[in-house]
Image (cartoon, rainbow, N blue to C red):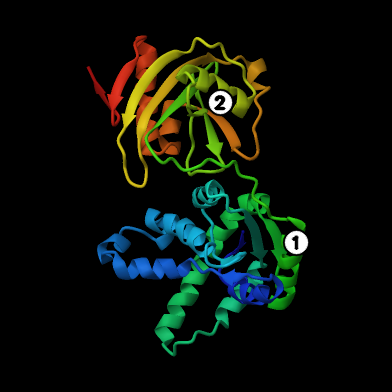
């Protein structure tokens, strides 16, 4: 298990984590910030000039998961992880990958009122005597107050909140330990095992009467997606698309789905690639749209969007696949793509 202590700088994550080690038998401190420091030493300096934070590195996010799994082969756990995580798509990627490894996460938000955060930042003491370094750290902390405030709505909905404004680190740790014992903060995420070879996946495009396409927001991976999923062994792809739509949204579709796009996705380590099919699920009436369901462990939201809106929401690979699928729907003829490029 991982007890993830979230919160902005100055909320007391590290001090609470050290106190928590005394209250959770077998626990070990796991600080992913050390992974960021290691990457800073190993990667070219130019790579860090391209990003604002080491959390923006896909390598860091994957290492957080891989290192946690490796540590849990050496220690009984839980791993106590004091780490600010304000971008929901990074939360989805990391927590979803941990769920795929069957590593449960207890997500706890240590929240502190902004006036107290500013006061703590002003009086923060560092081990180094470098005044310029101290000023830089304080400036960094203050710059994260606005992103933290922006992230609060989803953080409050996702994590168990412990208000540390008037608590000592020990008192905060005691509240976290009690929350862990009672199961609070458990992230109920669908377990989707990581592929070990190329996969075949079927997605379904559903439309409203304005021609907008339905996208869903998974809890277990970053970015918006089409309804659908991996085709099971011995299952017909179109049948898999129908099954996934029923499981994810509670919508029953006819078996005879029309193929729009077959796209060969090139392997890109650590991914294996494979074949991706997109089917036309047709137009949903207002009555059927009103009955859409969301399984909380798998999807957090759905939305009908225009093509231009989808471009801003989908990762590039999925957006390109959607773009060609819409052209195929308009032309009435399916398209074959290799790595997103039409052939034939």
Residue 170, image quadrant: bottom right
**The C terminus, quarter of image:** top left
Q: Residue at x 74, y 74 (%)?
A: 171
Tag 2 secondary structure = helix
> First in sequence: mark 1 or mark 2?
1
When the figure is inspected, residue 104 is found, relative to residue 79, above or below; the finding is: above
Residue 46 vs residue 76: left or right?
Answer: left
**Dot 1, how many residues are within 10 Å of its Cα: few (below 14), some (14-19), or many (20+)?**
few
Residue 302 vs residue 275: left or right?
Answer: right
Q: Mark 1 points at which residue?
A: 181
Judging depth in this view, the residue of 97 and 54 nearest the camera is 97
Q: Name the residue under label 2.
A: 244
Judging depth in this view, the residue of 64 and 216 nearest the camera is 64
- The reply to whether residue 165 is in sight is no
Q: How far apart are marks 1 and 2 (CA)?
A: 35 Å
Q: Which residue is drawn at 56% across and 77% down?
A: 121
Percent of width and height locating residue 177: 72, 67
Residue 136 vs residue 7: left or right?
Answer: left
Percent of width and height locating residue 79: 59, 65
Residue 60, image quadrant: bottom left
Residue 242 vs residue 156: left or right?
Answer: left
Tag 1 secondary structure = helix
Percent of width and height locating residue 138: 49, 76
Judging depth in this view, the residue of 228 and 144 nearest the camera is 228
Percent of width and height locating residue 59: 38, 56
**Numbered badge on residue 16:** none
């Amino acid at each position: 298990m991982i007890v993830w202590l979230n919160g902005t700088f100055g909320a007391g994550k590290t001090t609470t984590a050290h106190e928590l080690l005394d209250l959770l038998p077998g626990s070990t401190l796991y600080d992913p910030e050390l992974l960021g420091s290691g990457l800073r030493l190993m990667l070219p300096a130019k790579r860090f000039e391209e990003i604002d934070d080491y959390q923006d590195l896909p390598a860091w996010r994957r290492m957080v998961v891989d290192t946690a799994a490796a540590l849990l082969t050496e220690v009984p756990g839980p791993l106590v992880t004091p780490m600010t995580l304000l971008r929901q798509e990074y939360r989805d990627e990391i927590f979803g990958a941990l769920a795929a490894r069957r590593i449960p996460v207890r997500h706890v938000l240590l929240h502190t009122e902004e006036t107290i955060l500013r006061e703590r930042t002003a009086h923060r003491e560092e081990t180094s005597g470098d005044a310029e370094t101290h000023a830089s750290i304080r400036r960094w902390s203050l710059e994260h107050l606005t992103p933290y405030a922006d992230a609060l709505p989803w953080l409050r909905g996702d994590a168990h909140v412990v208000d540390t404004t008037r608590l000592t680190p020990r008192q905060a740790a005691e509240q976290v330990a009690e929350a862990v014992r009672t199961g609070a903060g458990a992230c109920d995420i669908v377990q989707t095992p990581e592929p070990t070879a190329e996969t075949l996946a079927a997605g379904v495009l559903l439309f409203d009467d304005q021609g907008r396409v339905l996208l869903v927001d998974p809890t277990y991976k970053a970015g918006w997606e089409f309804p659908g999923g991996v085709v099971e062994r011995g299952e017909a792809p179109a049948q898999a698309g129908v099954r996934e739509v029923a499981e994810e949204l509670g919508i029953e579709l006819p078996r005879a789905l029309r193929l729009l796009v077959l796209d060969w996705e090139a392997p890109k380590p650590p991914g294996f690639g494979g074949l991706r099919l997109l089917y036309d699920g047709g137009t949903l009436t207002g009555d059927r749209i009103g009955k859409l369901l969301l399984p909380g462990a798998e999807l957090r939201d759905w939305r009908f969007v225009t093509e231009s809106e989808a471009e801003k929401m989908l990762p590039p690979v999925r957006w390109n696949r959607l773009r060609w699928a819409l052209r195929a729907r308009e032309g009435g003829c399916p398209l074959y793509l290799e790595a997103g490029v039409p052939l034939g």
